[in-house]
Amino acid sequence: METNKKTIIVFSGDFDKVMAALIIATGAAAMGDQVTMFFTFWGLNAIRKPQKVKAGKKSFLQKMFGMMMPRGINKLGLSKMNFMGLGVPLMNKVIKAKGAMTLTQLLEAAREQGVKLVACTMTMELLGFSKEELLDGVELAGVAGYLAEADEANVNLFI
Amino acid sequence: METNKKTIIVFSGDFDKVMAALIIATGAAAMGDQVTMFFTFWGLNAIRKPQKVKAGKKSFLQKMFGMMMPRGINKLGLSKMNFMGLGVPLMNKVIKAKGAMTLTQLLEAAREQGVKLVACTMTMELLGFSKEELLDGVELAGVAGYLAEADEANVNLFI
Amino acid sequence: METNKKTIIVFSGDFDKVMAALIIATGAAAMGDQVTMFFTFWGLNAIRKPQKVKAGKKSFLQKMFGMMMPRGINKLGLSKMNFMGLGVPLMNKVIKAKGAMTLTQLLEAAREQGVKLVACTMTMELLGFSKEELLDGVELAGVAGYLAEADEANVNLFI
């Protein structure tokens, strides 16, 4: 089987959209494809460390953004039917009942399969995220890095 | 004219996004392209049968999801300016005044043109949708099925 | 370096999504790529002129849509954490503090770099926008025009 490259821009920080992105990424990696996920804007929340991390100097606004944005993949909300936060535990209940993978397990699987996780440096700078606040092993790149990979890929999605 | 393959993941169940997806799909089919639409997550609502269908056993949560999610393409809401449901009748009024096609007509046209409609099996399992609840003629596939088609296509969109 | 073509459908009229679209577009143009942005549905708001323009006859509903939709790129709201309009000034403050480009500057840069800005004729007809209401230099095309360009491009995104 010929293997191909895939890129996925994860712009959204919604539970359901991140789930879709991870299912496509792990599916493609399982078929032998090289997959790169670029986390940008709200998507960056999916690769934040859950714990509070001492980071460099932040402006007041950056501190505010940091505080208000979900800390890691376990804190994401649904894009629809979120029911003020109740939607995700319900969704997780269904996922477990069906023996499907939770978001955390999907992300872990992606890492084990060698899916490349890249954080958008521009968003990091704007919102004041330092590398230490993101999961270990996450790479950093800007738009040029994204485009270089997209040019080599045969499927490029924006989620 | 060379014809090509296109795939569209319809993740969204919003009236306007489903409309955009169908316009691209029918446009490409009219130009001779093979088009596959993968309906996943909320997008699945667009290919539900409007009537209630006796389906297999569902868990309480699956029944709840089934009840709360729109039943078919005529029940979708706008992503913006929905005005608590008023947005769609207004949009439909404009569509008819302009002699454009309604969502139902676009979906019908897509089917007549041979656009392949595929339901995501993983979402179906999670949310408890059976094949009988979806429009006749809809095919079923998982992420591997999607990737196989995307690899052959020259345009792959996530909507 | 080989140069390639890129197309971006800008469906969303959200500040953050339009920003992402413009960053990818200007980044690709800077690398020598030909880039076409298709503004459709709410995305059309990003290329409206800020001032009121005498346009042709509009139906009551079209007038209403015209009035309620943001007039130009400076009036867009965030898709998340909009805080009833407060999110954008805060975001702009961060952008300026970091020496990054505002949306208006990004759009200007895109135009200077030769990024092709195309308005979707179908949306224009539906919502009653005339060419005069859109920024000068914007081209018009339908779905066939989009598909012709997408067929020649190696990266096609829907934002």
Image: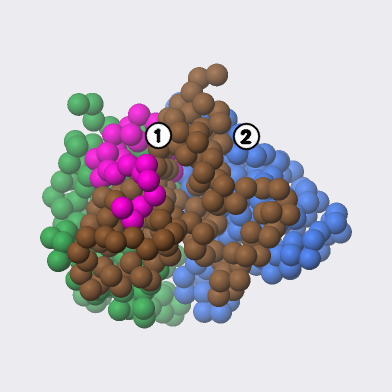
Chain colours: A green, B brown, C blue
Estimate how packed mark 1 is, as few (under 14), some (14 to 19) or many (20 or more) residues with alpha carbons within 10 Å.
many
The residue drawn where x is 44% and y is 55% is B46
x and y, in percent, of residue A71 in the image: 28, 72
Does residue A89 lie above or below A151 as drawn? below
- Res A151 label: 1
Residue furthest out toward the front: B54
Where does the magenta region start and end?
B132-157
| Quadrant of the image occupied by residue A42 | bottom left
Q: Quadrant of the N terminus of chain B?
A: top right
Q: Is residue C66 left or right of residue C158?
A: right
- The answer to whether A107 appears left or right of C23 in the picture is left
Please give the chain letter of the residue carrying mark 1: A
Kind of element beneath mark 2: helix
Q: Which is more toward the observer, C40 or B48?
A: B48
User: Which residue ends up furthest to the top in the rendered image?
Assistant: B1
Q: Is residue A104 visible?
A: no
> In terms of secondary structure, where does tag 1 sit?
helix
Comparing B33 with B135, the one in front is B135
